Amino acid sequence: MIIEQLYTGCLAEAAYYIESDGEVAIIDPLREVDQYINLAKSRNAKIKYVLETHFHADFVSGHVDLAAKTGATIVYGPTAMQTGFKAHIATDGEILNLGKVKIKVIHTPGHTMESCCFLLQNEAGLDTALFSGDTLFIGDVGRPDLAQHVIADLTQEKLAGHLYESLRNKIMPLSDDIIVYPNHGAGSACGKNMSKETTDTLGHQKKVNYALNPLLNKEEFIKDLLNGLTPPPGYFPQNVLLNIKGYENIDEVMARGNKALSAEEFETAMSEDKVVVIDSRRAPDFGNSFIPGSINIGLNGNFAVWVGTLVPDVKQRILIVADIGSEKEVLMRLSRVGYDQAIGYLEGGFDSWLQSGRPTDSIITISSEELAQINETEKPEILDVRKTSEFNSEHLMEATSIPLDYVSKNLASVNKNLTYYVHCAGGYRSMTFVSILRTLGYRNLINVDGGFAKLKASGKFKTTEYKEPISML
Protein backbone atom coordinates (compact mmCIF):
# COMPACT_ATOMS: atom_id res chain seq x y z
CA MET A 1 0.00 0.00 0.00
CA ILE A 2 1.27 3.47 -0.95
CA ILE A 3 -0.03 6.81 0.33
CA GLU A 4 1.34 10.05 -1.09
CA GLN A 5 0.27 13.55 -0.10
CA LEU A 6 0.62 15.90 -3.05
CA TYR A 7 0.66 19.36 -1.49
CA THR A 8 0.34 22.61 -3.42
CA GLY A 9 1.50 25.53 -1.32
CA CYS A 10 -0.03 28.42 -3.26
CA LEU A 11 -3.49 27.00 -2.58
CA ALA A 12 -2.59 25.28 0.70
CA GLU A 13 -4.27 22.23 -0.86
CA ALA A 14 -3.50 18.54 -0.45
CA ALA A 15 -4.50 15.89 -2.95
CA TYR A 16 -3.79 12.22 -2.24
CA TYR A 17 -2.55 9.22 -4.20
CA ILE A 18 -3.41 5.80 -2.74
CA GLU A 19 -2.21 2.63 -4.44
CA SER A 20 -2.72 -1.03 -3.67
CA ASP A 21 -2.00 -4.03 -5.87
CA GLY A 22 -2.01 -2.00 -9.09
CA GLU A 23 -5.15 0.01 -8.36
CA VAL A 24 -5.16 3.72 -7.50
CA ALA A 25 -7.54 6.18 -5.88
CA ILE A 26 -6.94 9.92 -6.21
CA ILE A 27 -8.57 12.12 -3.57
CA ASP A 28 -9.42 15.78 -4.28
CA PRO A 29 -7.20 16.23 -7.37
CA LEU A 30 -6.13 19.59 -8.76
CA ARG A 31 -6.98 20.69 -12.28
CA GLU A 32 -3.67 19.59 -13.83
CA VAL A 33 -4.45 15.88 -13.85
CA ASP A 34 -1.57 14.59 -15.95
CA GLN A 35 0.62 14.51 -12.83
CA TYR A 36 -1.62 11.80 -11.34
CA ILE A 37 -1.89 9.87 -14.59
CA ASN A 38 1.89 9.89 -15.07
CA LEU A 39 2.52 8.83 -11.47
CA ALA A 40 0.20 5.83 -11.81
CA LYS A 41 1.68 4.96 -15.21
CA SER A 42 5.21 5.03 -13.81
CA ARG A 43 4.16 2.35 -11.33
CA ASN A 44 2.19 0.25 -13.80
CA ALA A 45 -0.99 1.03 -11.90
CA LYS A 46 -4.47 2.05 -13.01
CA ILE A 47 -6.57 4.85 -11.53
CA LYS A 48 -9.84 3.28 -10.41
CA TYR A 49 -11.47 6.02 -8.33
CA VAL A 50 -11.52 9.80 -8.11
CA LEU A 51 -12.77 10.44 -4.58
CA GLU A 52 -14.22 13.86 -3.82
CA THR A 53 -14.68 14.81 -0.18
CA HIS A 54 -17.16 17.56 -1.16
CA PHE A 55 -17.92 20.17 -3.79
CA HIS A 56 -14.89 22.38 -3.33
CA ALA A 57 -15.20 26.16 -3.14
CA ASP A 58 -11.60 27.35 -3.16
CA PHE A 59 -10.40 25.52 -6.26
CA VAL A 60 -11.71 23.71 -9.30
CA SER A 61 -11.08 20.01 -8.86
CA GLY A 62 -9.63 17.87 -11.62
CA HIS A 63 -12.26 15.15 -11.17
CA VAL A 64 -14.01 15.62 -14.53
CA ASP A 65 -10.87 15.59 -16.67
CA LEU A 66 -9.25 12.81 -14.67
CA ALA A 67 -12.26 10.54 -15.06
CA ALA A 68 -12.51 11.35 -18.77
CA LYS A 69 -8.84 10.53 -19.39
CA THR A 70 -8.66 7.35 -17.31
CA GLY A 71 -12.18 5.91 -17.10
CA ALA A 72 -12.06 6.20 -13.31
CA THR A 73 -15.27 6.45 -11.28
CA ILE A 74 -15.98 9.77 -9.57
CA VAL A 75 -17.32 9.22 -6.05
CA TYR A 76 -19.16 11.71 -3.83
CA GLY A 77 -20.68 11.28 -0.41
CA PRO A 78 -24.39 10.95 0.38
CA THR A 79 -26.80 13.81 -0.40
CA ALA A 80 -24.62 15.16 -3.21
CA MET A 81 -26.84 17.03 -5.66
CA GLN A 82 -27.25 16.16 -9.31
CA THR A 83 -23.99 16.70 -11.17
CA GLY A 84 -23.37 17.62 -14.78
CA PHE A 85 -21.26 14.50 -15.26
CA LYS A 86 -21.45 10.82 -14.37
CA ALA A 87 -20.68 10.15 -10.70
CA HIS A 88 -21.32 7.52 -8.07
CA ILE A 89 -23.13 8.88 -5.01
CA ALA A 90 -22.00 6.62 -2.20
CA THR A 91 -24.02 5.65 0.85
CA ASP A 92 -22.85 6.25 4.39
CA GLY A 93 -20.61 3.33 5.41
CA GLU A 94 -20.20 2.04 1.85
CA ILE A 95 -16.99 0.09 1.23
CA LEU A 96 -14.90 0.73 -1.88
CA ASN A 97 -12.44 -2.03 -2.77
CA LEU A 98 -9.01 -0.89 -3.94
CA GLY A 99 -6.54 -3.68 -4.61
CA LYS A 100 -5.95 -5.37 -1.25
CA VAL A 101 -7.27 -2.48 0.86
CA LYS A 102 -10.69 -1.02 1.51
CA ILE A 103 -11.93 2.56 1.71
CA LYS A 104 -14.96 3.29 3.87
CA VAL A 105 -17.16 6.28 3.07
CA ILE A 106 -18.10 8.23 6.21
CA HIS A 107 -20.76 10.90 5.70
CA THR A 108 -19.79 13.97 7.75
CA PRO A 109 -22.11 16.89 6.90
CA GLY A 110 -21.22 20.28 8.32
CA HIS A 111 -18.71 22.03 6.09
CA THR A 112 -21.18 21.18 3.33
CA MET A 113 -24.08 18.75 3.40
CA GLU A 114 -22.42 16.21 1.10
CA SER A 115 -19.08 16.37 2.91
CA CYS A 116 -17.57 13.01 3.66
CA CYS A 117 -14.34 11.48 4.92
CA PHE A 118 -12.66 8.39 3.50
CA LEU A 119 -11.35 5.87 6.03
CA LEU A 120 -8.57 3.65 4.69
CA GLN A 121 -8.41 0.09 6.01
CA ASN A 122 -5.13 -1.72 5.33
CA GLU A 123 -4.56 -5.25 4.05
CA ALA A 124 -5.23 -6.61 7.55
CA GLY A 125 -8.52 -4.75 7.80
CA LEU A 126 -7.23 -2.22 10.37
CA ASP A 127 -8.28 1.42 10.23
CA THR A 128 -5.12 3.23 9.14
CA ALA A 129 -5.77 6.69 7.68
CA LEU A 130 -8.58 9.21 7.57
CA PHE A 131 -8.78 11.48 4.52
CA SER A 132 -10.82 14.14 6.21
CA GLY A 133 -11.41 16.68 3.45
CA ASP A 134 -12.62 19.95 4.93
CA THR A 135 -14.37 18.27 7.84
CA LEU A 136 -11.28 18.08 10.05
CA PHE A 137 -8.08 20.04 9.61
CA ILE A 138 -4.93 19.96 11.70
CA GLY A 139 -5.82 22.40 14.48
CA ASP A 140 -9.20 23.36 13.07
CA VAL A 141 -12.36 22.23 11.28
CA GLY A 142 -14.03 23.39 8.09
CA ARG A 143 -15.93 26.66 8.10
CA PRO A 144 -19.71 26.09 7.99
CA ASP A 145 -20.77 29.15 6.02
CA LEU A 146 -19.87 28.29 2.43
CA ALA A 147 -22.81 26.14 1.33
CA GLN A 148 -25.26 28.90 2.24
CA HIS A 149 -23.90 30.92 -0.66
CA VAL A 150 -25.20 28.21 -2.99
CA ILE A 151 -28.25 26.94 -1.03
CA ALA A 152 -29.92 29.83 0.78
CA ASP A 153 -31.72 27.93 3.55
CA LEU A 154 -28.50 26.31 4.77
CA THR A 155 -27.54 28.83 7.43
CA GLN A 156 -24.10 28.71 9.01
CA GLU A 157 -25.72 27.87 12.36
CA LYS A 158 -27.46 24.82 10.86
CA LEU A 159 -24.27 23.62 9.21
CA ALA A 160 -22.24 24.18 12.36
CA GLY A 161 -24.74 22.04 14.25
CA HIS A 162 -24.38 19.27 11.67
CA LEU A 163 -20.60 19.50 11.95
CA TYR A 164 -20.78 19.13 15.73
CA GLU A 165 -22.74 15.89 15.35
CA SER A 166 -20.45 14.60 12.59
CA LEU A 167 -17.33 15.13 14.67
CA ARG A 168 -18.80 13.64 17.85
CA ASN A 169 -20.58 10.69 16.28
CA LYS A 170 -18.39 9.79 13.29
CA ILE A 171 -14.83 11.04 13.85
CA MET A 172 -14.04 11.17 17.56
CA PRO A 173 -14.99 7.50 18.19
CA LEU A 174 -12.27 6.38 15.76
CA SER A 175 -8.94 5.00 16.99
CA ASP A 176 -6.36 7.50 18.26
CA ASP A 177 -3.55 6.05 16.14
CA ILE A 178 -5.27 6.81 12.82
CA ILE A 179 -3.35 9.33 10.70
CA VAL A 180 -5.41 12.34 9.63
CA TYR A 181 -4.84 13.63 6.11
CA PRO A 182 -6.82 16.88 5.55
CA ASN A 183 -7.55 18.68 2.28
CA HIS A 184 -5.95 21.97 3.40
CA GLY A 185 -3.24 23.49 5.56
CA ALA A 186 -2.37 26.92 6.93
CA GLY A 187 -3.23 29.76 4.58
CA SER A 188 -6.45 28.32 3.22
CA ALA A 189 -9.63 30.36 3.58
CA CYS A 190 -11.61 27.17 4.25
CA GLY A 191 -10.77 27.39 7.97
CA LYS A 192 -9.56 30.03 10.39
CA ASN A 193 -6.91 28.42 12.62
CA MET A 194 -5.15 25.70 10.66
CA SER A 195 -1.75 24.40 11.66
CA LYS A 196 1.30 24.53 9.39
CA GLU A 197 1.49 20.77 9.83
CA THR A 198 -0.33 18.82 7.13
CA THR A 199 -0.80 15.48 8.95
CA ASP A 200 -1.26 14.32 12.53
CA THR A 201 -2.66 11.46 14.55
CA LEU A 202 -6.31 11.66 15.45
CA GLY A 203 -5.38 11.09 19.09
CA HIS A 204 -3.21 14.20 19.18
CA GLN A 205 -5.90 16.25 17.49
CA LYS A 206 -8.37 15.17 20.17
CA LYS A 207 -6.02 16.74 22.70
CA VAL A 208 -5.14 20.00 20.94
CA ASN A 209 -7.88 20.85 18.44
CA TYR A 210 -10.39 23.21 20.06
CA ALA A 211 -13.24 21.79 17.98
CA LEU A 212 -12.69 18.29 19.37
CA ASN A 213 -12.89 19.36 22.99
CA PRO A 214 -15.28 16.78 24.52
CA LEU A 215 -16.46 19.31 27.11
CA LEU A 216 -18.01 21.59 24.50
CA ASN A 217 -21.76 21.31 24.13
CA LYS A 218 -23.37 22.07 20.77
CA GLU A 219 -24.18 25.69 21.55
CA GLU A 220 -20.65 26.40 22.74
CA PHE A 221 -19.19 24.64 19.70
CA ILE A 222 -21.30 26.71 17.31
CA LYS A 223 -20.32 29.92 19.06
CA ASP A 224 -16.60 29.08 18.98
CA LEU A 225 -16.73 27.95 15.37
CA LEU A 226 -18.49 31.05 14.07
CA ASN A 227 -16.44 33.51 16.11
CA GLY A 228 -14.01 35.43 13.93
CA LEU A 229 -15.23 34.16 10.57
CA THR A 230 -14.84 36.74 7.80
CA PRO A 231 -16.72 36.63 4.48
CA PRO A 232 -15.20 34.10 2.05
CA PRO A 233 -13.60 35.26 -1.21
CA GLY A 234 -16.12 36.10 -3.91
CA TYR A 235 -15.02 33.36 -6.28
CA PHE A 236 -15.94 30.55 -3.89
CA PRO A 237 -19.60 30.10 -4.99
CA GLN A 238 -18.54 30.21 -8.65
CA ASN A 239 -16.01 27.42 -8.08
CA VAL A 240 -18.64 25.32 -6.30
CA LEU A 241 -20.91 25.53 -9.35
CA LEU A 242 -18.07 24.60 -11.70
CA ASN A 243 -17.33 21.56 -9.55
CA ILE A 244 -21.00 20.54 -9.62
CA LYS A 245 -21.82 21.23 -13.25
CA GLY A 246 -18.48 20.50 -14.90
CA TYR A 247 -16.14 22.70 -16.90
CA GLU A 248 -14.11 23.06 -20.07
CA ASN A 249 -11.30 20.59 -20.70
CA ILE A 250 -8.04 21.82 -19.19
CA ASP A 251 -6.11 21.17 -22.41
CA GLU A 252 -8.43 23.51 -24.33
CA VAL A 253 -8.14 26.17 -21.63
CA MET A 254 -4.34 26.06 -21.72
CA ALA A 255 -4.24 26.13 -25.52
CA ARG A 256 -6.45 29.23 -25.67
CA GLY A 257 -4.44 31.16 -23.11
CA ASN A 258 -1.03 30.08 -24.35
CA LYS A 259 -1.07 32.59 -27.19
CA ALA A 260 1.92 34.88 -27.59
CA LEU A 261 0.93 38.45 -28.54
CA SER A 262 3.27 41.10 -29.88
CA ALA A 263 3.23 44.48 -28.15
CA GLU A 264 1.00 45.79 -30.93
CA GLU A 265 -1.41 42.84 -30.68
CA PHE A 266 -1.41 43.10 -26.88
CA GLU A 267 -2.29 46.80 -27.03
CA THR A 268 -5.12 46.10 -29.46
CA ALA A 269 -6.50 43.36 -27.20
CA MET A 270 -6.32 45.74 -24.23
CA SER A 271 -8.58 48.19 -26.04
CA GLU A 272 -11.44 45.68 -26.08
CA ASP A 273 -14.17 45.97 -23.46
CA LYS A 274 -13.97 44.06 -20.19
CA VAL A 275 -10.38 42.88 -20.45
CA VAL A 276 -8.22 42.81 -17.30
CA VAL A 277 -4.43 42.91 -17.58
CA ILE A 278 -2.67 40.99 -14.81
CA ASP A 279 1.06 41.54 -14.42
CA SER A 280 2.47 38.57 -12.50
CA ARG A 281 5.99 39.91 -12.05
CA ARG A 282 7.45 40.59 -8.61
CA ALA A 283 6.31 43.78 -6.91
CA PRO A 284 9.64 45.70 -7.26
CA ASP A 285 9.82 44.97 -11.00
CA PHE A 286 6.22 46.03 -11.51
CA GLY A 287 6.64 49.22 -9.49
CA ASN A 288 9.67 50.28 -11.54
CA SER A 289 7.71 50.19 -14.80
CA PHE A 290 4.44 48.68 -15.98
CA ILE A 291 1.76 48.94 -18.63
CA PRO A 292 -0.79 51.62 -17.65
CA GLY A 293 -4.05 50.01 -16.58
CA SER A 294 -2.51 46.71 -15.47
CA ILE A 295 -2.67 45.35 -11.93
CA ASN A 296 0.09 43.51 -10.12
CA ILE A 297 -0.64 40.09 -8.62
CA GLY A 298 2.72 38.41 -8.23
CA LEU A 299 3.22 34.78 -9.13
CA ASN A 300 5.64 34.54 -6.19
CA GLY A 301 2.74 34.77 -3.68
CA ASN A 302 -0.74 33.28 -3.36
CA PHE A 303 -1.42 34.24 -6.95
CA ALA A 304 -4.52 32.16 -7.66
CA VAL A 305 -6.23 33.06 -4.39
CA TRP A 306 -5.64 36.78 -4.91
CA VAL A 307 -6.91 36.66 -8.48
CA GLY A 308 -10.04 34.92 -7.18
CA THR A 309 -10.42 37.48 -4.43
CA LEU A 310 -9.85 40.60 -6.52
CA VAL A 311 -11.32 39.71 -9.93
CA PRO A 312 -15.07 39.24 -9.32
CA ASP A 313 -16.06 37.08 -12.29
CA VAL A 314 -14.37 33.78 -13.19
CA LYS A 315 -15.50 34.40 -16.79
CA GLN A 316 -13.41 37.57 -16.94
CA ARG A 317 -11.23 37.83 -20.05
CA ILE A 318 -7.61 38.20 -18.96
CA LEU A 319 -4.37 39.31 -20.60
CA ILE A 320 -1.10 38.29 -18.96
CA VAL A 321 2.24 39.99 -18.48
CA ALA A 322 4.74 37.49 -17.07
CA ASP A 323 8.42 36.77 -16.72
CA ILE A 324 9.64 34.86 -19.76
CA GLY A 325 9.12 31.15 -19.22
CA SER A 326 6.45 31.49 -16.53
CA GLU A 327 3.47 32.03 -18.84
CA LYS A 328 2.18 28.44 -18.62
CA GLU A 329 2.49 28.46 -14.85
CA VAL A 330 0.35 31.61 -14.72
CA LEU A 331 -2.27 29.99 -16.94
CA MET A 332 -2.32 26.84 -14.83
CA ARG A 333 -2.73 28.74 -11.59
CA LEU A 334 -5.57 30.76 -13.10
CA SER A 335 -7.32 27.57 -14.18
CA ARG A 336 -7.01 26.09 -10.70
CA VAL A 337 -9.56 28.64 -9.51
CA GLY A 338 -11.71 28.60 -12.64
CA TYR A 339 -10.35 31.63 -14.50
CA ASP A 340 -10.34 29.93 -17.87
CA GLN A 341 -10.71 32.95 -20.15
CA ALA A 342 -7.12 34.08 -20.47
CA ILE A 343 -6.72 35.13 -24.11
CA GLY A 344 -2.96 35.54 -24.40
CA TYR A 345 0.27 36.87 -22.95
CA LEU A 346 2.80 39.55 -23.90
CA GLU A 347 5.45 37.87 -26.04
CA GLY A 348 8.95 38.56 -24.79
CA GLY A 349 7.71 39.75 -21.42
CA PHE A 350 7.54 43.38 -20.31
CA ASP A 351 10.83 44.20 -22.07
CA SER A 352 9.09 43.85 -25.43
CA TRP A 353 6.63 46.57 -24.39
CA LEU A 354 9.52 48.83 -23.38
CA GLN A 355 11.34 48.21 -26.64
CA SER A 356 8.23 49.08 -28.61
CA GLY A 357 8.30 52.58 -27.14
CA ARG A 358 4.77 52.38 -25.81
CA PRO A 359 3.70 54.33 -22.69
CA THR A 360 4.60 53.04 -19.22
CA ASP A 361 3.77 54.02 -15.66
CA SER A 362 5.53 53.53 -12.33
CA ILE A 363 4.74 53.49 -8.61
CA ILE A 364 6.88 55.18 -5.99
CA THR A 365 8.20 52.73 -3.42
CA ILE A 366 10.03 53.68 -0.24
CA SER A 367 11.56 51.50 2.46
CA SER A 368 10.17 51.05 5.95
CA GLU A 369 13.18 53.02 7.21
CA GLU A 370 12.34 55.96 4.96
CA LEU A 371 8.75 56.05 6.22
CA ALA A 372 10.07 55.95 9.79
CA GLN A 373 12.18 59.03 9.03
CA ILE A 374 9.19 60.82 7.50
CA ASN A 375 7.19 60.01 10.62
CA GLU A 376 9.68 61.95 12.75
CA THR A 377 8.77 65.29 11.13
CA GLU A 378 5.33 64.71 9.61
CA LYS A 379 2.10 62.91 10.37
CA PRO A 380 1.82 60.68 7.32
CA GLU A 381 -1.46 59.07 6.29
CA ILE A 382 -0.77 55.32 6.55
CA LEU A 383 -2.93 52.55 5.14
CA ASP A 384 -2.51 49.00 6.46
CA VAL A 385 -3.85 46.56 3.84
CA ARG A 386 -3.26 43.35 5.79
CA LYS A 387 -6.17 41.17 6.79
CA THR A 388 -8.43 42.45 9.56
CA SER A 389 -7.21 39.69 11.86
CA GLU A 390 -3.59 40.76 11.33
CA PHE A 391 -4.46 44.39 11.98
CA ASN A 392 -6.38 43.56 15.13
CA SER A 393 -3.48 41.49 16.42
CA GLU A 394 -1.12 44.47 16.27
CA HIS A 395 -0.75 47.58 14.15
CA LEU A 396 0.70 51.08 13.98
CA MET A 397 -1.42 53.55 15.92
CA GLU A 398 -1.17 55.95 12.99
CA ALA A 399 -2.51 53.40 10.51
CA THR A 400 -5.99 52.94 9.08
CA SER A 401 -7.12 49.45 8.13
CA ILE A 402 -8.33 48.87 4.60
CA PRO A 403 -7.82 45.14 3.92
CA LEU A 404 -6.83 44.26 0.37
CA ASP A 405 -9.41 41.46 0.52
CA TYR A 406 -12.23 44.02 0.49
CA VAL A 407 -10.63 46.99 -1.24
CA SER A 408 -13.63 47.70 -3.46
CA LYS A 409 -15.93 48.04 -0.44
CA ASN A 410 -13.71 50.65 1.20
CA LEU A 411 -12.73 52.95 -1.68
CA ALA A 412 -14.83 55.78 -0.28
CA SER A 413 -12.42 55.93 2.65
CA VAL A 414 -9.49 56.91 0.42
CA ASN A 415 -9.25 60.59 -0.56
CA LYS A 416 -7.74 61.04 -4.03
CA ASN A 417 -6.31 64.39 -2.95
CA LEU A 418 -4.28 63.03 -0.03
CA THR A 419 -0.96 61.23 -0.09
CA TYR A 420 -1.04 57.79 1.54
CA TYR A 421 1.74 55.39 2.48
CA VAL A 422 0.56 51.81 1.98
CA HIS A 423 2.03 48.82 3.78
CA CYS A 424 1.23 45.15 4.37
CA ALA A 425 3.40 42.47 5.95
CA GLY A 426 6.18 42.58 3.38
CA GLY A 427 5.31 44.46 0.19
CA TYR A 428 3.40 41.94 -1.94
CA ARG A 429 -0.15 42.99 -1.03
CA SER A 430 0.62 46.69 -0.75
CA MET A 431 1.82 46.83 -4.36
CA THR A 432 -1.30 44.99 -5.49
CA PHE A 433 -3.45 47.46 -3.55
CA VAL A 434 -1.70 50.51 -5.03
CA SER A 435 -1.84 49.08 -8.56
CA ILE A 436 -5.60 48.52 -8.33
CA LEU A 437 -6.22 52.04 -7.11
CA ARG A 438 -3.92 53.42 -9.81
CA THR A 439 -6.27 51.95 -12.45
CA LEU A 440 -9.07 53.93 -10.76
CA GLY A 441 -7.24 57.24 -10.89
CA TYR A 442 -5.56 57.33 -7.46
CA ARG A 443 -2.07 58.70 -8.06
CA ASN A 444 -1.03 59.75 -4.56
CA LEU A 445 -0.39 56.33 -3.06
CA ILE A 446 3.17 55.36 -2.14
CA ASN A 447 4.11 51.73 -1.63
CA VAL A 448 6.11 50.83 1.49
CA ASP A 449 8.49 47.92 1.11
CA GLY A 450 9.44 45.86 4.16
CA GLY A 451 6.08 45.76 5.86
CA PHE A 452 4.76 45.97 9.39
CA ALA A 453 7.55 44.09 11.17
CA LYS A 454 10.23 46.50 9.91
CA LEU A 455 8.08 49.53 10.65
CA LYS A 456 7.63 48.31 14.20
CA ALA A 457 11.33 47.48 14.56
CA SER A 458 12.29 51.02 13.58
CA GLY A 459 11.07 52.25 16.97
CA LYS A 460 9.60 55.34 15.31
CA PHE A 461 5.97 54.23 15.62
CA LYS A 462 3.69 53.41 18.50
CA THR A 463 1.83 50.16 18.10
CA THR A 464 -1.38 48.95 19.65
CA GLU A 465 -2.93 45.53 19.97
CA TYR A 466 -6.37 46.68 18.90
CA LYS A 467 -7.92 49.53 16.98
CA GLU A 468 -11.35 49.44 15.37
CA PRO A 469 -10.76 49.33 11.62
CA ILE A 470 -12.83 51.20 9.08
CA SER A 471 -14.49 47.99 8.04
CA MET A 472 -14.70 44.64 9.79
CA LEU A 473 -15.19 42.96 6.40
Image (cartoon, rainbow, N blue to C red):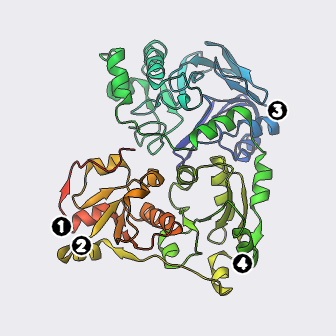
Residue 37's x, y, as percent? Answer: 75, 42
Q: Nearer the viewer, mark 2 or mark 3?
A: 2
Query: Is residue 89 left or right of 459 when viewed as pictured?
Result: right
- Disc 2: which residue: 372
- Disc 3: which residue: 71
**Identity of the residue drawn at 68% across and 17% down:** 90
Whether the residues at callouts 4 and 3 have beta carbons within 8 Å, the answer is: no
- Disc 1: which residue: 459
- Disc 4: which residue: 263
Residue 327's x, y, as percent? Answer: 67, 64
Instruction: Indicate the quadrant containing the C terminus: top left, top right, bottom left or bottom right.
Output: top left
- Give the residue type at disc 3: Gly
Residue 357's x, y, as percent? Answer: 65, 87
Q: Nearer the viewer, mark 4 or mark 3?
A: 4
Q: Is residue 106 above or below residue 26?
A: above
Q: Earlier in the sequence, mark 2 or mark 4?
A: 4
Quadrant assignment, res 208: top left
Q: Earlier in the sequence, mark 1 or mark 3?
A: 3
Query: What's the CA distance linking mark 4 and mark 1?
Result: 46 Å
Q: Nearer the viewer, residue 150 or 43?
A: 150
Label 1 crowd (10 A; few <14 / some 14-19 / many >=20): few
Quadrant assignment, res 113: top right
Query: What's the CA distance linking mark 2 and mark 4?
Result: 40 Å
**Viewer can see residue 114:** yes
